[in-house]
Structure formats: C-alpha cells, structure tokens
Image: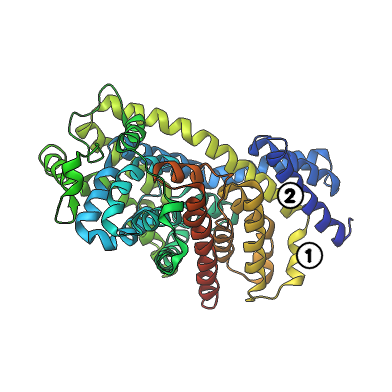
Amino acid sequence: MTSDILTIVYTAVAILGVVILITRFRLNPAVALVVGALFLGLVIGLGPEKTISTITEGFGSIMAEVGLLIAFGVLLGSMLSEMQAIQRLVSHLLRLFGPKGLPYALGLTIGTVLQSIFLDVLLVISAPLARKMAPLIGRFGTARIATAMAISLECGIVLMVPGVAALALAGVLGVPLGMMLLFGFIVVVPTIVISIFIMSWLFRLGFWKPEKDETPVGEDDATDAIDATDASPSSSPAPSPTRALSTEDRRSSVGGVPRGVAVAQRTQARTEPRLVILFAPLLLCLALIATGAILQIAEIEIPVLQLVTNPVFALLLAVLGTSLVGRLTIGQPRVEKAVVAGFRESGQILILTGVGGSLAATVAATGLGDILGQAFGAGGFAPLLVVWGIAAILHVAVGSVTISAITAAGILAPIAPIIGLDPILIALAAGAGSLFAVHVTSNTFWLLQSLLGQTTRGTLKTCTVGVSVASVVALGMTLILSIFL
C-alpha cells in the first residue's frame, strides 16, 4: 500500500498537472480533469479497471444527483432572459430603492433570485441598463455598480441555489439541496452587503480614480451589446428600457429614474405583464425547496409535501410555469428558441460538473480522506481554512470558479464523515475560496470592463479586489456558521 506521504504527493501532482494542462497547454478543462483522475488512480495503485470504473461511477453519481437540476436551472434562466425580465427588474429596483440603495438592492437580487440565469447572459443583459443608472448614484457610481455586479454574480453562482456551481458542490458533497439553499442564503446575503459596504468605503477613501479607472463608452455601444443578446425576428415591438437616451433625457430624470427609462417603464406597464408574474414560477420553486429543507430539519414526513418540495419536482414546476408564462407573453417560437439555447449552454456545464465528480471520486478512492482526517480535529477551523485555500489557489491558476470549487470540495469531502464535519460547511468554504482573485483569465472580468465603462486598472479594483473581499467575508461567515453546526 502506498504510503501516506506518497498519497498526498501524488494527489498534489495530479491537481498541479490539471492546472498546467489547462493553463499552459490550453486543454479543455473537462478533458484535463479526466486525465488527472486517470493519472491519480493508476499511480496510487487502483489498477486500470478500478481506475476507469471509479471515474465513470463518480461521473454517474454526481449526474444522478444534480444533472436534471442543472439542466432545468439553465432552461429556466434562458427563458427568463428571452422574456427580458432582467432589464425590467433592474429599472424596477432603481425606482423602488432609489439611486443610493441600488448597488445593494441589485447585488442582493442578482446574488439570490436570479442564479438560474447563466452568468455571462445575466451580466450582458443587465449591465447596459445598470451603467445608465451609475451616474445617478454619485461620483463613484460606476465603481459601486460594477463592484455590486461582480460580487453578486460570482457569489451567487457558488453559494446560492440554483447557481450551477452551488448545485455541483451539493452533488459532490451529498448535501441536500434544500440545506444548500438555506445555508447558502444565510452566508451570501451578509457577504454581499458587507463586501459592497467595504468597497464603497474604500472608494470614498480614494481607492477609485475616475480619470484613470473609468473610460467613456457610448450609449449606442451599450445598447448594441444588449440588442445582440436579445434580438430575434419575433422580438416584441415594445420599447426596451435599455434604448439609448437622448441628450435631453440624460440631463433629466423622473423620481430618480432617467426620463427615457421612466417612459419605457410606463409603456411596458401598458403592454407587458407584471414583473412578479414573470418570476412567480422561480420564486415558488425556491419557496418549495426551502420548505423541504425546513421539514427535513424538523423531521416531518408527509408524502405529498415530500414530493412537491423535492428539488427536481420544484424546478420542473418552475420550468413548466415559466414556459407557460413565456408562451402567453412572447409567444411559442421565442420560448422554443430559449429552450434550444438553454440546452446548448447546459451541455458544457453538465460535462464539467460530471468530470469534477470523477476526480473527486478518485481522490476519495486513494484513502486521502483517512489521512487528512487524522490531521484535523472535529469542529476545528483547520479543514475549512484548507479547503478555502485550495480553492483559492486553484482559481488563481485556472481561472474557473466552478472547477476550483468542485476540485477543492472533492479533495476534502472524504474527511467530513471521519471528523464529524458537516458537508455543507465544506461546500460553503470551497465556494468562498473559489471566489478569490477573479482576474484576467476570467471572461466575466472582461465583460465587466467593456460593458460598464472601466479601464483594466478599474476592473482590477472592482472585480478582482471586490470579489476577493467577498471571498474573505464569505469564509468568515462560514466559520461563524461552523460554531453552530
């Protein structure tokens, strides 16, 4: 039997090899993860047959756990995107909370309710309107709105159901989805609020230099970016709140809302359904999943409630409900178009999640969990700090939030039952670590720069520093939570 030291060394080499294959040789992450799992299984002594079976079983296990959930979540988000629900929501938030409260309101909404929408799509359809609102917030409007979006987008995808990385983490660690939703919500809300507050304070202290950190972006450019996403032959003729504003409109506002946006809102109110109707199926889904978690904690078993609060059933209801709303509002052809786009997007996510489970299963088969379990004591902070650190290092190297979170969680997942550590804590710590240092290897970084009128220097502040602050805050929230679990 391979010694404990060699087991740790081989695992480290396998993970490092995956990083090098992705970053240096530009190998597809899914293929690199399988190669890493194959290498680890063979050198650790599992043998060819056992190694292959472990990889395939790990893939199948996590797909059985979260495959349908991820597919349904992406379909749901794709349909909401096609219905232009996000543009309307952002303008509604501005009207409801006012310019000063917009960064917090927008951040909390994106980080919690809107996580079924694919991250890049959510950013592209919400950024142009958010940028129009930035001047109303004050001198640091661009900085604050960009920071709020960066933090909420990244935090939501790894900490909040149905974010794809959150679903994957729950699958790798065997965390009930309802528990992931409840405790993820407990962590993500204060993380977003505290992080935005800290960054706003830093901006006021001189951290943000508008003349060096901002770059003017024409209104038409911003409009083109969103039109390229939403345009279709059958698009509704109703005016969009993201249309370029005239010079006179930009100089005036109605109740804190730019006049052009206010006019669009009034027009939409006459031609489109209420916003709550568009989001009702998604909100009902989240409520059902949360109810299921509460019933599980209370050990209440009622067959009918167990069915309707099951995450798969709840998300299926959301997909069917959103599809019905879409058929009544934008028509069947556009709903079908959204479904096709959703399936196209979900394929890569599903494969990546599955092979992440393959590597995690191979790591578990090496006995690394027993080795690490002897090094950590139950209830201590050390395992959580280690999983946060591994995820952070992987993210800096690879640039993928999902890959780093899944890999870090998979490495330490085997120690959870040995030391009595609740797997939900490992999931949250891995998610928090994977947020650290979002930088130039991330397409989100460049989308934030181009769509929100920032220089690269400015984006390093709002995105890289801002999300890193959120990573540390989320770790702190997780450590506090560990005292009670």
User: Relative to 33, is 145 above or below?
Assistant: below
User: Relative to 15, is 368 above or below?
Assistant: below
Describe residue 112's horizontal placement relative to residue 27 as left or right: left
> Which numbered tag is attached to residue 371?
1
Describe residue 342's horizontal placement relative to residue 404 as left or right: left
Disc 2 designates what residue? 15
Circle count: 2
**Residue at the location (28% across, 43% down)?**
87
Whole-number angstrom distance, CA of label 2 to CA of label 1: 17 Å
Q: What residue type is labelled 1?
A: Ile
**How far across and how far down the image is residue 130, in percent?**
32, 48
Q: Can residue 269 be seen in this view?
A: yes
Q: Is mark 2 on a helix, strand or loop?
A: helix
Which of the 4 image quadrants contains residue 53? top right
Q: What residue type is labelled 2?
A: Ile
**Residue at the location (55% across, 73% down)?**
479
**How far across and how far down the image is residue 129, in percent?**
29, 45
> Neighbour class for label 2 at 10 Å: few (<14), some, many (≥20)?
many
**How far across and how far down the image is residue 187, in percent?**
46, 66
